[in-house]
Amino acid sequence: MNDRPNSLHALDRQSVIHPYTNLAVHQEVGPHVITGGEGIYVVDDQGKRYIEGLAGLFCAGLGFSEPRLVEAATRQLKTMPFYHSFAHKSTEPGIRLAEKLLEMAPVPMSKVFLAGSGSEANDTAIKLVWYYNNAVGRPEKKKIISRRKAYHGVTVATASLTGLPFNHRDFDLPIANILHTDCPHYWRFAEPGESEEDFATRLVGNLEQMILEEGPETVAAFFAEPVMVSGGVITPPKTYFEKLQTVLKKYDILLVADEVICGFGRTGNMFGSETYGMKPDMISCAKQLSAAYMPISALMINEKIANVLVDQSRKIGTFSHGYTYGGHPVAAAVALEALTIYQETDIVSHVRAVSVRFQEGIAKLGDHPLIGEARGVGLVAGLEFVKDKVTKENFPPAWQVANHAGKFATERGVLTRGLGDMVSLCPAMIINEKQIDDLMARMQLALDDTLSWARSRGYVA
């Protein structure tokens, strides 16, 4: 007798640890197994088709069936399936990818370090900040400032930079020398009557006060995403980065731009730094770097930092940092092809064109009784759920309203996530206007389903 279950949903629920699982909702639910994809759509093991509303995890920018990326991987697997980048070794795809990234960078960059994930790229940035300051004779200049609601990864160091409490709780984080300043969410944190410019001035003033209290000679770097996507798709207020960079320059503090989600077209420019006038010393990128077809990330550093690293490594006799799979030739070949596709198809112009329809749809969803603010830029947006649209009071966390909205979206054929008070949308950048209209219609139904569910429990009138 064959005891194998008909569906993978029935397999042992304890065999895999699923990250970001909301146990209150999902503890009795097996994994949702995705078996295929085409364009902006994916299919599960029951044959149901969905719009992938988050492009996987904000990463499958070219959708789920781009043949050129498959061909690039296959060619490289046949030629050279693996080699490392230690001890003066390299591969042609890794070198060509680094050159392409330097060509595309939004500000002049000098060197590229290849790794396997956004967390690794940001973790490397932290190490290089410390290495750099030791090399220039400032061993006390080690503190790094991030922001509340920031997301920079989940390694020990990058999870410390991440400004979300659940990434710290019971993990004994954050580590020493990591500080968090204000979240630049104007709608949520501005004072009554305060303009965006005045809000930005206040936040940057608070940052400068923090630097002075800590001692400018101890503060090494500031990490910032152009848009704080995982923290709620928080776009910066007007003049924020302009004023912030003036303060950083005043105290000789490095700026690291986390472009892991924003990079390669998502905000309507090739890099989010261009969208918001950032001029970083380092840039981390991943996700859409390979359109998610292979795990890869990169950290770009400017000439000032690169020269110091080279001189210090000559003095020590080695540069003792690297990963086995950093610059993996197959991943690099796929990333190089993805960047070529972005340029050949002018993905930035496409995003700019269709994002008008996308953001109009998001704004209409913002009129829903459950949504306090609908916000976004380019092809990424967030819907913040509130109990009261006037006072901006959120629902009690135990009610899991946004999480249930994500569940109803799944039932309506859209895969997204409800985390905290937010549901985000970030479809593949190849989406067209007809598909955007379909996505918005399905999300409207999901919000209506959520409202009916909330009323049935007495959560809303």
Image (cartoon, rainbow, N blue to C red):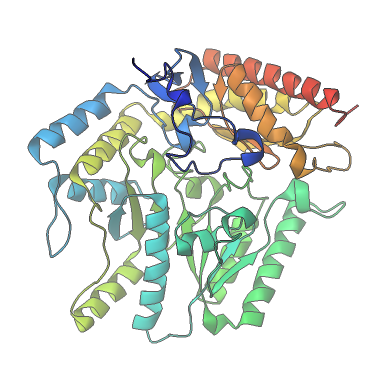
Q: Measuring 74% from the left and 63% from the top, which residue is drawn there?
A: 202
Residue 326: x percent and y percent? 25, 53
- Quick one: quadrant of the N terminus? top left
Q: Across the whole image, how many numbered discs are drawn on residues? A: 0
Residue 172, quarter of the rendered image: bottom right
The residue closer to the viewer here, 45 or 343, is: 45
The residue closer to the viewer here, 250 or 332, is: 332
Residue 85 higher or lower than 42, as above or below = below
Residue 82 higher or lower than 414, as above or below = below
Residue 455 higher or lower than 335, as above or below = above
The residue positioned farthest toward the left in the image shown: 79
Q: Measuring 70% from the left and 62% from the top, which residue is drawn there?
A: 203
Residue 430: x percent and y percent? 43, 23
Q: Measuring 66% from the left and 69% from the top, which residue is drawn there?
A: 207
Residue 79 appears in the figure: yes
The residue positioned farthest toward the front in the image shown: 1
Residue 124: x percent and y percent? 37, 63
Residue 436 higher or lower than 235, as above or below = above
